[in-house]
Image (cartoon, rainbow, N blue to C red):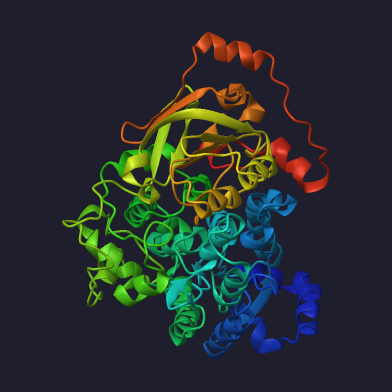
Amino acid sequence: MRSDNIKEGINRTPHRSLLRACGLDDEDIKKPFIGIANSYTDIVPGHIHLKDLVKEVKDVIRSMGGVPFEFNTMAICDGIAMNHEGMYYSLPSREIVANTVESMAMAHQFDALILMPSCDKIVPGMLMAAARLDIPSIVVTGGPMMPGKFHGETVDFINVTEAVGSAQSGKMSMDELYELERCACPGAGSCAGLFTANTMACLTETLGMSLPGCATAHAVSDKKVEIARKSAEAIFTLIDKDIKPSDILTQEAFENAIKVDLALGGSTNTTLHIPAIAHEVDGVDVSIDLFDKLSHEVPYICSIRPAGDNRMIDVENAGGIPAVMKNLESILATDCMSVTSKTIKDNLEEVGDIDYSVIHSIDDPIKSEGGIAVLRGNLAPNGCVIKQGAVNDDMLIHSGPCKVFNSEEECVEAIESDKIVDGDVVVIRYEGPKGGPGMREMLNPTAAIMGRELFHVALITDGRFSGGSRGPCIGHVSPEAAEFGPIGAIQDGDIVSINVKERTINLELSDEEIESRLANVEAPKRNLKGWLKQYQQLATSADKGGILK
C-alpha cells in the first residue's frame, strides 16, 4: 500500500507514534488509509450539508476495513463574492483547492481519495489534484439545491439577481423583491439551475469520475446519501483493481464531457475548467478550439435555466446525466473507463425511462448546434466564448456602438443610472486573469441588464460570466486588455459587429488604428499584495484555461 511509506518498518516508528495519537491501533495501521477531501463550510449553501454527508462516507469506509482521514479545503460562494473585491479571489481559489488536496495527499501518503466538492471552482480544483496525484479517486459532488416558489412560480438564485434590476427600474415593488429574497434559495445545495457548479458536476459524472446519477441527485435527497455510501464502497474496488484517474481521464473522456456540456448548454466557465483539468493529464490536449469544433457536431438537447425554464430537479426526474448520455450514445466514446470499474457502455445499459420533453433525443434537438460557441476576429484574435444556447435568435447577429468601462463597478453604475440603452455594446475590460486579477464574473451587469428588459444589449468582457448569465454575453476575450489585447483599444462610440452564426467578432477599425491606439494605452493601476499579486504574475490567458505557469 502507498500508505506503507508512513507506517512500515523501524524507521517509521515515529510516524506510527503520531498515528496512534490520532486514535489508531495495531489493526488500524494495517488498513488502507483513505483521504477524504471535504469542502464543507458554514457560509456556502452548496457545502453546508457536506459535514453530514461525509459521516456516511466515513462509516462505510470503517465498515469495509479502511481508515478514513477527513481534511478540509477552502470553498468560495460565487454568489456571495459577486460584485465586490471578493470576486477577485474566486477563480484563483481553484488553484488553492488543487494545491491543498495535492499537498495533503502527498504529505500523508493516502492510498486513495474521496473528493467531496460542490460549487464552482472546488469541483475542477479537486479534479486537477486527482489528475496530478493519480491515485484511486472518486468524486461525490454535493448536489443541486431545490428551487423555491414565488407567487406560484418556480424560482432560483438568478431570479433574485435579475429582480434587483426590475425593482430599481420600477417593474417590481420592494416588498415583492424582499419576498423573493426569502424564498428563492430554500436550503442546501448548489444553485438550482445549470450554472457553473451543476455544469461541472454533470461533466464530472460524464468524465467517469463520479457514480452514475451523482450530478443531479439533490443535496437534501436520500439518493445523495445513497450515492455517497456507494462511492465509499467503490473506492475499495478502485484500490483492488488499481484503477486510477489516468485510466479514466483520457482524451476520449474529455471529448465526451465537452459533448455533454454542449448538449446541455452548460456554463462558459467550462472552457476554463476542462482545459485546466486536462492540462494535468499527460497526453491529453483540450483547447477552446475543441469546444468550437464539437459545437458544430453536437446538438443542443436540454434547455435548463438560465437558457430555459427547467431546473436541475427536472433533469433529475427526466433521468439525469445517464439519460443525457444515453441519448448521445451514438456520438460518445463508450469504451471509456469509469469509477464504477465498468465502461461507459456498461453503465448506460442500466438507463431506464427518459422524459423526452426535458431531455430531447438527438434526432429531435432543441437546436442543431451545441450551447457554447467560440468567436474570433480582430477584437479577439485568440478567441472568446458565448453561451449561444441562452441567446435569443434575434441577437445572434448584432452590431452597435460601444460604451466602454474599465471595471465592473463602473459598468454597474452606468446601468443603474439608465445610461445603457437597447442597441448598445457594453464593454468591460481589465477584468481578465491578469487585469482583474482573477477574472471576475459579470453576473451583476448581465442581471441588471436583463432585469431592465434591455434584451438588445450585448456585453463583451475579458472577464467571465456566471453560469447564470443569459443573453448575448461574450466573455474570455483573448488577449485580455492587461496584455495589450485589441479590447484595450476600444473607445466609446466605436462599432463592434458580432455574428455568432459565423463565429466572428470584429471592431470596425483598421489594424493600423488598433495598433496606434494600443501604443498609447495606459492600463489602470492595481495596488496588489499577497495571493492576488502572486496570481497575477503566474496566470495565463483565458484561452489557456487561466492556469498558472
Residue drawn at x 67%, y 49% as measured from the top left: 92
Q: Looking at the picture, how far across and down is residue 443, in whole percent?
A: 57, 52
Quarter occupied by the C terminus: top right
Q: Looking at the picture, how far across and down is residue 414, in whole percent?
A: 64, 41
Q: Is residue 397 above or below residue 513?
A: below
Q: Looking at the picture, how far across and down is residue 43, in whole percent?
A: 69, 71
Q: In which quarter of the image is residue 25?
A: bottom right
Q: In this view, does 286 lie above or below 160?
A: above
Q: Is residue 398 above or below residue 101?
A: above
Left or right: 480 in relation to 238: right
Q: Residue furthest left?
A: 363
Residue drawn at x 46%, y 87% as measured from the top left: 222
> Observer-nearest residue: 236 or 164?
164
Left or right: 355 in relation to 137: left
Residue 123 appears in the figure:
no
Left or right: 20 in relation to 425: right
> Observer-nearest residue: 476 or 79?
79
Total numbered labels? 0
Residue drawn at x 51%, y 78% as measured from the top left: 219
Q: Looking at the picture, how far across and down is residue 319, in whole percent?
A: 30, 74
Residue 294 appears in the figure:
yes
Left or right: 393 in relation to 97: left
Q: Which residue lies furthest to the bottom in this view?
A: 63
> Observer-nearest residue: 468 or 224?
468
Quarter occupied by the N terminus: bottom right
